[in-house]
């Protein structure tokens, strides 16, 4: 999960570094694959709270929630990359 989040962040940085619409278009296929893989991984993640009766269970739940939030943030960044940029 961490590597997927890192890949999504790296792809967002590539998109932000692209200076022209042509450069962004050239990256779009890779962008869509990375975003699709991230969305698929989020869909397959457990949604339940797990064993919250123990301190270890709560710590694991908290760590998983932080990872999920990081991945969702990266996904939001990637989605914003697809929006038309205002003219400068």
Image (cartoon, helix red, strand yellow):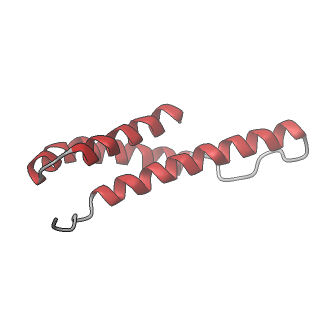
Q: Quadrant of the C terminus?
A: bottom left
Image coords of residue 27 (percent x, y) = 19, 43
Q: Residue at x 53, y 34 (%)?
A: 2
Query: Does 88 appear above or below 15?
Result: below
Q: Is residue 77 left or right of residue 21?
A: right
Q: Is residue 67 left or right of residue 37?
A: right
The one of 12 and 64 positioned closer to us in this rendering:
12
Image coords of residue 28 (percent x, y) = 20, 48
Which residue is outermost to the top?
Answer: 3
Image coords of residue 53 (percent x, y) = 90, 46
Which quarter of the picture shows residue 14?
Answer: top left
Which residue is outermost to the left?
Answer: 22
The one of 17 and 33 positioned closer to us in this rendering:
17
Q: Is residue 80 left or right of residue 30?
A: right
Which quarter of the picture shows residue 85?
Answer: bottom left
Q: Is residue 46 left or right of residue 76?
A: right
Label tally: 0
Q: Residue at x 43, y 57 (%)?
A: 76
Which residue is outermost to the bottom?
Answer: 86
Image coords of residue 33 (percent x, y) = 30, 43
Which residue is outermost to the front?
Answer: 88
Q: Residue at x 29, y 56 (%)?
A: 81
């Amino acid at each position: 999960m961490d590597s997927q989040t890192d890949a999504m962040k790296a792809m967002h940085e590539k998109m932000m570094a692209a200076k022209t619409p042509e450069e962004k278009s050239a990256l779009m296929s890779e962008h869509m694959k990375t975003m699709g893989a991230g969305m698929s991984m989020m869909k397959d993640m457990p949604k339940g709270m797990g064993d919250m009766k123990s301190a270890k269970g709560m710590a694991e739940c908290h760590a998983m929630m932080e990872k999920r939030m990081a991945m969702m943030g990266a996904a939001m960044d990637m989605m914003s990359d697809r929006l038309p940029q205002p003219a400068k």
